[in-house]
Image (cartoon, rainbow, N blue to C red):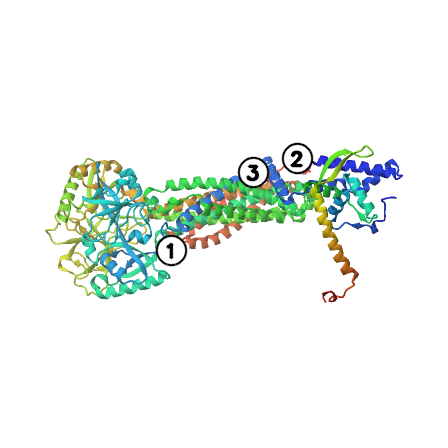
Amino acid sequence: MTTQRNTVDRIALLQGTLDLLILKTLVLGPCHGQEVARSIQRQSEEIFFVDHGSLYLALQRLEDKKWVTAKWGVSENNRKARFYSMTAKGRDQLVEKTGEWQRLTRAMELILSGRTGPSGEEA
Amino acid sequence: MFKRKRSVDDFVEEIKAHLELEADELKREGASEEDARRKAKVEFGSVSAAQERFHLRGRVVWLENLLRDVRFAFRQLVKNPGFAFAAIAVLVLGIGVCVAMFAFVDAALIKPLPYADPQRLVHVTESDVAAPKVNISYLDYLDWKKLNTVLSSMDVFTGWDALLSAPTGTVPVPAERVSAGFFRTLGVAPALGRGFHSGEDSLAAPNVVLISYGFWQRQFGGRKDAIGQTVKLSGVLHTVIGVLPKGFEFALGNSPEIWAALKPDNNCEKDRGCHNLYAVGRLKDGVSVQTALANMQSIARQLENQYPDSNRGRGASVMLLSEMIVGEIRPILLLLLSGAGLLLLIACVNVSSLLVVRSESRKREIAVRGALGASRGRLAGQFVTEGMVLVIGGAAAGLAFADGAMQILSRLISKEMIARMPYLNGLGLNPHVLVFAGILALLASLLFSVAQIPYLFSSGIRDGLTEGGRGSAGTLWRRIGGRLVVIELATTMVLLTGAGLLGKSLYRLLHVDVGFQVDHLATLNVRLPGAQFPGDSEQVAFTRRMLDQVESLPGLRAAAVTTVLPVTCACNSDWVRIAGRPYSGNHITVNDRDVSAGFFTTLRAKLLAGRYFTDADDASKPKVVVTNHAFARKYFPGEDPIGKKIGDSTLSPSSMKQIVGVVEDFKDGSLDDEQQPTVYNPFNQDASSGFVLIVRTSQDEHTVLPALAATIHQLNPDVGVEKGSTMSDQINDSQTAYFHRSTAYLVGGFAALALVLSTVGLYGVVAYSVSQRTREIGVRMALGAQRWSVHRMVLREAAWLAAAGIVIGAVCSLAFGALLRGLLFGVRAWDLPTLVTVATVLGLSALFASYIPAHRAASVNPVEALRAE
């Protein structure tokens, strides 16, 4: 499998969703930045394109907010890498953001699938 | 819990790690080593952009830019210290002078009087045919106070020549008599003790006084037990009941130390026709000055009908107290402030042109920065910042300069003047002044930006990269710089004209023919204590002895006394009526002076007809008077006034006097007053307890003053003498001369500075234009132009600028002169000689400013000029 895909199929991440995706990735345990990027791309079936510059800035932002902590370590293949792990505060955020996101997607779904007329739902 | 901020290096390290991890993974997926590295990099995108975003994260970009601009501006200024020094020095001068003048305006005109609700305080006087504001008589005051419906309170005050008996002898002390409610009307409470109770100004009440804070400190050492102690004033014991607050001031009094309750105990206060008081009142809520005036005028009319002999023709005048206090100085201060404003304008224009020259010479820098991606906004921001750094530096130093200038100026003001302007005590860098300085700084920065920015956005910038900068180089600057210099020259012309007019008017004033010989005259104010010298006979006897003693002093030629010193004020007037003429009820107002027999000979006035007084014209003889020529001319045209009789309005027999002499006019009033009819009475027939001794000396008149005082104290130690003076000093230091002189000097100073600045400005423009045209001049000369024609070309350019400035300036001067009119004496606002002189001075200095660059242009070596390319 290759990461090289036709860029037309890719979707830029929605504003504010990257934080949520990073947190979700970190649930499974500490990861370094490259793993996070790969993981997001893989799990979204290569739909999401993660701008790496933005990813590292987002990681830094989360670190500044103390949702994640980071320390330098060594990767499986003996490379130096900076590992990120989720804090308790990050975990709370993940729960909250996931809930928010689910409400949002449900609402979007309701509207976009168009199962009800403009006034039908009220009755 | 502070964690060190993560460094950019660490971030870069992480990205590097990412690229390696990614490359590893790609290799594992089957890519070659080199391909994997390249792909990883491509996938990542711009590393440096990420790095920059990391750097900028959480920062306020504009603030960073601003700080960077400020740092850069400082570096620029430090790199070019000559420019920085010149620009800041010019700004300090302009802002400093302007702020100092504003501080005076603020202290005098903006700050409210230090009384409760000062906008409701009014000054109330009577008016008559001769003058719009004259004193009010005590009996009229009582009626006005009773009948008016517009004032919640009304009180009177008048000066008192008190003599204080101190352990060291009798000394005059400035004092004021006020009616009991005076301080309540002003809304001032004593700092210690109590104020006057109502009724304490009645004849039967015990003698009580309030004292000033300064007097309390000096005489009583600031002790609380001063209350209840007594002071002997003019031979009578007065009990101290209170001390006024420290900062208390009353500009209409002569810095009084003693405030006594005004009892109607002298003859004047029993006579409705004798006017010796001024009044202050507090307007009732909702009553305007106009309403109050109308009410007072109707009362005055009522009194006119009721007491025609004393009140015919007497009206009322009501004006705000603050107007009364600062009305006279307002036009002067506003003039000075506008003069300082013009100077600041010139200073700013000068600095603008310096800045524009600099942006011209930094064209390459601007072009390079533009080419490297600096937006025009950022470039403009950079230039605005540089201007602001200059302005802020200039304004800060300007404030210090202003503070110094204020201290020097207020120290230069004589004590007598300060006493009349107590509000100047509040002079200083207060919040008003600081806000004003801030506004000036803002306007200056705005001006600098406006002068530079159009230049930045001109197309010339883009050519900046092409070295050599010929073609249109500098033409834009020549246009902007030329205009700036014209503004400068025009403004200078206005200031110079103002200074010229004021200087001429000062000269005219000081050279007014006073009508007598001013030099070698010494004067001394003498006060006889009323208790020892109750009547005319005692006063006359003392004066005779005193004059005898004084005349025998060595070096003295003549001595005399008068109740009003010449060249002081047109005060002390009287009404007279000429016997044998039909009387329509119109008063003849004359200056009234009581003088001793030797008065005219001491002054060396000229006798036109009849005789002077003799010492024998005393109470035992029929009453006689001498008049001045103005009186004779006005009331006895074509007639011989000698032998004619005048009397009071009712021609009461006791008031009848025969005219025995006419003297040539001399200045009875102040220097700028019109000559008024004056009547002189013999002191021996109409004595007074306060008078001025005048002596003519053969040596320096200052040296006899101590001897005069000593002689008088030898005769009677209880007689008070005030610090003596000389007639020339009196004239030079008179309020009129003082105001004229200080205005002329200050505006003259502004004009001189303006002249220097604009000359330098013109020099700058012409010199710069020459340096820009060196190559062109070289070409011209190579093609055969003569040196003189190059010379003329440069001079012509300067001459056009100067001529435009002078013509515009002349037109503006006419408008400015119209504003000055009220302050001029003996000079018209459109004085042609002044305009011509000023234009010549300005023209010459412009010629001087352009001669040097013209000379330099003419000595250009064409070969070198062309090779320099």
Instruction: Mark 2: give few (<14), some (14-19) or many (20+) Cα within 10 Å.
Output: few
**Which circle's residue, 2 or 1, is located before the other in the chain?**
2
| Label 2: chain letter | B
Tag 1's secondary structure? helix
Q: Could you say which is closer to the camera, residue B458 or residue B215?
A: B215
Q: Which residue is mark 3?
A: B84
Tags 2 and 1 both on a single chain: yes
Tag 3's secondary structure? helix
Quarter of the figure that contains the C terminus of chain B: top right
- Give x and y (percent) for residue A114: 78, 62
Instruction: Mark 1: give few (<14), some (14-19) or many (20+) Cα within 10 Å.
Output: some
Q: Which residue is mark 2?
A: B4
Tag 2's secondary structure? loop
Image quadrant assignment for residue A71: top right
Give, as a three-letter code, the residue at label 2: Arg
> Which mark, residue A33?
none
Give, as a three-letter code, the residue at label 1: Gln
- Give x and y (percent) for residue B150: 32, 62
Mark in the foreground, 1 or 3:
1
Task: Give the residue at the far left of this rendering.
Answer: B620
Give, as a three-letter code, the residue at label 3: Ala
Disc 2 to disc 1, C-alpha distance: 62 Å
Q: Could you say which is closer to the camera, residue B371 or residue A17?
A: A17
- Judge left or right: residue B661 versus residue A120: left
